[in-house]
Amino acid sequence: MELVSLPPQVKEFLDTILFPHFKTRISDDEHKEVIEKVLECIRDLAEEMGPASIADHMEWIVATIESLLDKTATCQSRKGDMDNEGPEEGDDSEDS
C-alpha cells in the first residue's frame, strides 16, 4: 500500500499544532472522555486524510494505546479511578 503524500502546509499543521496538542491532552488530562475524543479524532483523521496523516506519529499512537491497555495512562491512574469507586459506597447506606 503506497502512502499518498500530504500537501506541505497540511503536514506542517499536523506536526506542529495538531499532534502536539493531542500529545498534551493525552499525557496531562485525567478525564477518560477527553482521551476517548482525542483517539476518535486520530481515527477520523486517518479515515478522512489517509494513513499518511498519522504515519509519522504511529510510534507514539501505539505507545499511547499500549499504556491505555496496560491501565497505566494518566487518566487511569489518578483521580479518575477514585471517582468510579464513589457510587459503590453510597449503595451500602440505602440497604439499612
Image (cartoon, helix red, strand yellow):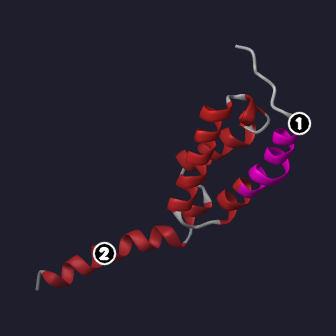
Magenta residues (range)? 9-21
Task: Look at the picture and state if 31 lies above or below 36.
Answer: below
Q: Quadrant of residue 50?
A: top right
In this rendering, position of residue 49 left or right of residue 36: right
The Cα–Cα distance between marks 1 and 2, rounded to whole angstroms, is 50 Å
What residue sits 56% from the left and 62% below the top?
Answer: 75
**How far across and how far down the image is residue 55, in percent?**
75, 32
Residue type marked 1 = Pro
Check the picture and name the quadrant holding the C terminus.
bottom left
Q: Nearer the viewer, residue 63 or 92?
A: 63
Q: Is residue 13 magenta?
A: yes
Q: Nearer the viewer, residue 7 or 19?
A: 7
What residue sits 56% from the left and 69% below the top?
Answer: 78
- Circle 2 residues within 10 Å: few <14, some 14–19, many ≥20: few
**How far across and how far down the image is residue 73, in percent?**
60, 56
Which dot, 1 or 2, sits closer to the camera? 1
In this rendering, position of residue 88 left or right of residue 85: left
Numbered disc 2: secondary structure: helix
In this rendering, position of residue 44 left or right of residue 56: left
Check the picture and name the quadrant holding the N terminus.
top right
- Count of marks, rendered view: 2
- Which residue is under mark 1? 8
Residue type marked 2 = Pro
Q: Is residue 19 magenta?
A: yes
Q: Nearer the viewer, residue 34 or 78?
A: 34
**How far across and how far down the image is residue 93, in percent?**
19, 84
Q: Which circle marks residue 87 in the picture? A: 2
What residue sits 67% from the left and 61% below the top?
Answer: 25
Q: Tell which circle, 1 or 2, labels the residue nearer the N-terminal end.
A: 1
